[in-house]
Image (spheres, rainbow, N blue to C red):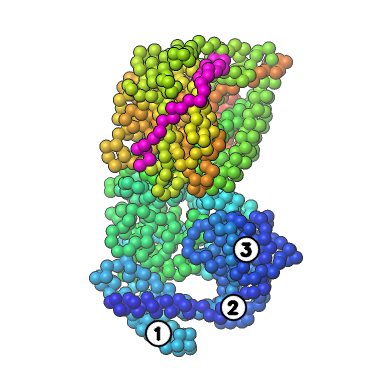
């Protein structure tokens, strides 16, 4: 059979070489170098200059140019194609790309995988090609040529190629292998190859094609295998990274190219269906190419285009806050509903770096029934045991989950790795089904086909191959083009009440890309600050609406939230994009913060202007709990007793007392709660808790040990933190200076530590009235490939630690008993992590950090990481952050850790009252709750109308009856889903709302 195999392979290459004829190079090309196009109207021809085909063009990475040429096509019975070449071959998301405008119409994209435009026959063609060098290539070449298609040869080529590739999958001893090869040998034996390209050759091609259509596809293949036959569901798809090796600005062009190509191919392949996620991409298309956008709307209405996915962008699900995840789905679903009349049911995240255990509840309460991904197959250590299962989150809510299993499998066992960038070749059609693990539940498996990451999407070649794999090639599953939603609806019926459906509880932790918790510290800080700023702006805007009658600035807040959500894309906030992406982030975050601060300042000013100035200050408490807390009064730290939650009150008396004793000579700090001792390197060697009469720090250890690790991942520099890197570190013990600093109610020690070309300055703040120690840190960092962590070995014995995630907490092991435990050597948390035993604990709170490592009694917080690829300037310069040490009696649930975490991230504020008299209440609360374990995260105006939305969650996994009261005026209250749709009316008694809330449950209440 080897002889026949070699014969078919050779004859197939001959067919490939004769698919085109009458090739003619276009020479009358002119060029106009440019920046990003501002419209779809090309420059005036007077701005173009002659261009010699094949010359270099481009003046640096991210260069653009317009090319122009005209030609006349003579009548022919053969299809005519216009080809664009760059002499750069192979798939790469960063290769040059083009948009083709033919006779004034934006037709499609062109790239190394989509190389031609199918023309309409004879006539005059006026062509403009808008070129982009790509993000890594500064100079490239451009060629244009015309060619006729020898249709019979082209079709026979695919007729033979598809089953021939199947031979690489089938066992050589199988009957299917022998029969397929026999048919292929018979077909190519019909070819007359004495003079390739002669009339006899082309006649023989027709004969061979008739044989393949009748004998192979007509008789040998079988697509009628019954309803339960294994079937691979092909979904036309392109994954477009909103930013990565390119900027958000370039993505606006990518969506035009990719979606234009889809629309063009749909004209030629009526069976072609396509799906795409991410509302941002559709908004980009609407703004940049409204004529294409209208065509997309038509295809959606026709049932050929599926707009699905659930989120505004395919967001990171580790770093993004709970409220931001809600807004991702809220903004995404509302866009698709308002623009296309489509209600999304699927969260589509093929390429995201891990999945929070808070997601199932968020999804189910947003009307999302399915979660789909493939990235989990990138696990380095353990393979997930299921591909279809019920995923249960921290509150007990479950969501159906499906993992994509596409892989181009050869002979042997399936591999762990799968892809969302597939093709319709027979090997991948078979490999997708073979890799799928839940065959006892389901006879179908998804194959997403189309080039992605940098866009592009399916090719005509893929659609031609799909036409043949749909015929049912023996040895391979059936192939069917369909939508994700239709497939999942069928699967839903199969798994309903099915005892064979597996269950997975807790997070879907990706055992890879752990460095993304830490890379680009500045961006993560900007994100955290923006998330809280917008919660504050919404609360104050809704309050000033209620109190002063101001309009709620919905449009401004909406625009700011869109920018926050956009920058939570899974290659932006993780720190895995190029420098230019973060340059734009700096601009975006300035706009985001300026917008929020303008709203906040206006609200505070309005309220203060209506309070008698003799009353002193108006203090704003953004939290739903009342306690003593820190506040800055004219820039000085003070302590204030706060009687009002989620509102404001007047105050003219603040506590600036600070009885903290600092002895630089004895290297000791004494507060009413702690005695803290330092060694000669000004590392902490003892923290004695005076209230609990116990030592916090582990024996013979140093705390706040600033550890520097050499960080050289073997792959994916910015993404990775490898287990071999944790074996060796250097503690920073050098001290440049130490001084005592005072700030009202707190006193600190400022320590400056040099390190190579860098410097880390820490001010350790001690409070007399608060049970925490703050580590205010400023690094002037100029090292690369170094990870910096703060380590706290503590005297706590526990085999698990508790980490805050979105809307709750998650326990993880502190040991490495199993491979699953070992893989979690670095994990993600939101505002805090806690290590407690039965009667005492220690928490580390942060204001912008996410990476944690708690093992063998040591809590490590990852401060910053300085990779060089893809951004050589990552984490260079000034890095600011604050973390706090919070020892506590009892368990985490019995402590004030949650309160301290909110205060650090979202402090109280105060402004002077400026009114002649008080014309509004001097004390006002948006929300008062009678249970400390229930947090009000959000107060805002409803998306539709002017009602008030309150979002609560339970933070201690404790089922609770809670009573809510408010100073807001309302008549009725409704329990809503996260999309703000009413579910049921709540009873209101004496202006108070009583309701049950389960452990870690999220409740949304609408006041009307």
Report the front residue among 435 and 942: 435
Q: Which of the two marks, 1 or 3, is nearer to us in this view?
A: 3
Identified at 44% across, 60% down, the residue is 449
- State which quarter of the image contains the N terminus: bottom left
Element type at mark 3 = strand
Q: Earlier along the polypeptide chain: callout 1 or callout 2? A: 2
Q: What is the x, y in percent for residue 133?
A: 58, 59
Element type at mark 1 = loop
Q: Which mark is residue 57?
A: 3
Element type at mark 2 = strand
Q: What is the x, y in percent for residue 391?
A: 36, 43
Q: What is the x, y in percent for residue 29?
A: 66, 70
Q: Which mark is residue 191?
A: 1
User: Counting other residues with Cα less than 10 Å from the Cα at mark 3, is it few (<14), some (14-19), or many (20 or more)?
Assistant: some
**Residue 256 versus residue 167 in the image, above or below:** above
- Residue 288 belongs to the span the image colors magenta: no
- Residue 740 belongs to the span the image colors magenta: yes
Q: How many marks?
A: 3
Identified at 45% across, 70% down, the residue is 464
């Amino acid at each position: 059979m080897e002889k026949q195999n070699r014969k078919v392979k050779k004859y197939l290459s001959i067919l490939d070489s004769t698919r085109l004829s009458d090739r003619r190079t276009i020479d009358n090309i002119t060029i106009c170098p440019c920046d990003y196009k501002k419209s779809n109207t090309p420059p005036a021809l007077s701005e173009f200059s002659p261009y010699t085909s094949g010359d270099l063009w481009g003046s640096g990475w991210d260069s653009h140019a317009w090319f122009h040429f005209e030609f006349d096509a003579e009548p022919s019975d053969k299809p005519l194609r216009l080809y664009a070449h760059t002499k750069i071959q192979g798939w790469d998301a960063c290769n040059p790309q083009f948009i083709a405008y033919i006779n004034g119409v934006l037709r499609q994209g062109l790239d190394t995988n989509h190389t031609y435009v199918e023309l309409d026959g004879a006539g005059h063609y006026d062509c403009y090609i808008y070129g982009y060098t790509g993000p890594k290539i500064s100079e490239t070449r451009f060629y244009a040529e015309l060619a006729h298609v020898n249709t019979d040869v082209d079709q026979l080529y695919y007729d033979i190629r598809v089953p021939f590739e199947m031979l690489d999958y089938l066992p050589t001893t199988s009957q299917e292998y022998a029969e397929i090869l026999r048919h292929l040998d018979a077909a190519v034996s019909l070819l007359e190859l004495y003079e390739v390209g002669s009339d006899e050759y082309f006649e023989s091609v027709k004969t061979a094609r008739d044989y393949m259509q009748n004998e192979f596809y007509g008789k040998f293949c079988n697509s009628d295998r019954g309803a339960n036959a294994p079937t691979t569901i092909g979904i036309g798809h392109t994954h477009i990274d909103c930013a990565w090796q390119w900027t958000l600005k370039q993505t606006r062009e990518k969506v035009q190219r990719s979606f234009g190509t889809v629309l063009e191919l749909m004209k030629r392949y009526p069976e072609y269906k396509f799906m795409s996620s991410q509302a941002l991409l559709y908004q980009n298309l609407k703004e940049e190419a409204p004529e294409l956008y209208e065509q997309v709307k038509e295809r959606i209405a026709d049932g050929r285009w599926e707009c699905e996915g659930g989120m505004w962008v395919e967001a990171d699900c580790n770093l993004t806050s709970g409220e931001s995840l809600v807004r991702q789905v809220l903004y995404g679903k509302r866009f698709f509903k308002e623009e296309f009349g489509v209600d999304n049911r699927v969260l589509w995240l093929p390429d995201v770096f891990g999945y929070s255990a808070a997601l199932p509840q968020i999804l189910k309460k947003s009307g999302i029934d399915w979660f789909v991904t493939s990235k989990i197959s990138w696990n380095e250590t353990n393979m997930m045991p299921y591909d279809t299962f019920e995923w249960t989150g921290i509150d007990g809510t479950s969501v159906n989950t499906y993992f994509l299993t596409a892989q181009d499998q050869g002979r042997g066992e399936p591999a762990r790795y799968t892809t969302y960038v597939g093709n319709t070749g027979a090997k991948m059609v078979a490999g997708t089904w073979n890799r799928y693990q839940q065959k006892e539940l389901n006879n179908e498996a998804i194959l997403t086909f189309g080039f992605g990451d940098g866009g592009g999407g399916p090719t005509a070649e893929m659609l031609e191959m799909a036409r043949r794999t749909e015929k049912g090639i023996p040895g391979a599953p059936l192939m069917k083009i369909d939508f994700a939603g239709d497939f999942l609806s069928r699967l839903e019926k199969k798994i309903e009440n099915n005892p064979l459906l597996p269950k997975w509880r807790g997070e879907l932790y990706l055992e890879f890309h752990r460095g993304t918790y830490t890379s680009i510290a500045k961006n993560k800080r900007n994100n955290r600050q923006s998330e809280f700023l917008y919660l504050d702006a919404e609360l104050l805007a809704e309050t000033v609406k209620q109190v002063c009658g101001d309009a709620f600035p919905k449009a401004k807040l909406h625009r700011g939230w869109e920018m926050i959500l956009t920058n939570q894309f899974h290659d932006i906030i993780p720190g895995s994009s190029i420098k230019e992406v973060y340059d734009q982030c700096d601009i975006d975050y300035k706009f985001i913060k300026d917008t929020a601060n303008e709203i906040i300042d206006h609200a505070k000013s309005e309220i203060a202007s209506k309070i008698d100035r003799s009353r002193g200050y108006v203090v704003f408490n953004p939290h739903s709990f009342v306690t003593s807390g820190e506040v800055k009064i004219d820039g000085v730290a003070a302590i204030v007793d706060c009687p009002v939650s989620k509102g404001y009150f007047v105050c003219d008396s603040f506590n600036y007392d600070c009885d903290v004793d600092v002895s630089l000579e004895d290297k000791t700090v004494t507060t009413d709660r702690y005695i803290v001792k330092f060694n000669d390197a000004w590392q902490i060697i003892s923290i004695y808790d005076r209230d609990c009469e116990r030592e916090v720090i582990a024996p013979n250890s140093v705390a706040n040990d600033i550890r520097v690790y050499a960080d050289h991942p073997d792959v994916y520099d910015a993404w990775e933190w490898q287990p071999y890197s944790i074996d060796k570190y250097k503690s920073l013990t050098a001290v440049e200076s130490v001084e005592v600093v005072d700030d009202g109610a707190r006193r600190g020690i400022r320590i400056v530590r040099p390190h190579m070309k860098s410097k880390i300055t820490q001010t350790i703040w001690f409070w007399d009235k608060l049970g925490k120690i703050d580590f205010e840190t400023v690094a002037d960092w100029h090292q690369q490939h170094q990870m910096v962590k703060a380590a706290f070995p503590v005297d706590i014995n526990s085999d698990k630690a508790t980490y805050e995630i979105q809307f709750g907490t998650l326990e993880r092991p502190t040991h490495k008993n199993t491979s699953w435990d070992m893989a979690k050597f670095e994990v993600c948390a939101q505002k805090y992590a806690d290590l407690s035993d039965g009667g005492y604990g220690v928490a580390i709170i942060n204001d912008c950090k996410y990476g944690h490592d708690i093992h063998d009694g040591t809590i490590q917080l990852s401060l910053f990481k300085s990779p060089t690829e893809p951004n050589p300037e990552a984490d260079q310069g000034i890095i600011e952050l604050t973390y706090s040490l919070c020892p506590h009696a009892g368990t985490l649930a019995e402590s004030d850790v949650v309160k301290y975490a909110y205060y650090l991230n979202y402090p109280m504020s105060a402004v002077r009252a400026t009114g002649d008299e008080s014309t509004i209440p001097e004390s006002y609360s948006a929300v008062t709750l009678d249970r400390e374990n229930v947090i009000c995260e959000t107060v805002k105006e409803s998306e539709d109308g002017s009602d008030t939305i309150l979002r609560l969650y339970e933070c201690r996994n404790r089922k609770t009856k809670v009573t809510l009261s408010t100073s807001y005026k309302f008549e009725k209250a409704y329990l809503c889903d996260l999309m703000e749709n009413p579910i049921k009316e709540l009873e209101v008694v004496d202006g108070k709302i009583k309701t049950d809330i389960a452990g870690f449950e999220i409740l949304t209440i609408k006041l009307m």
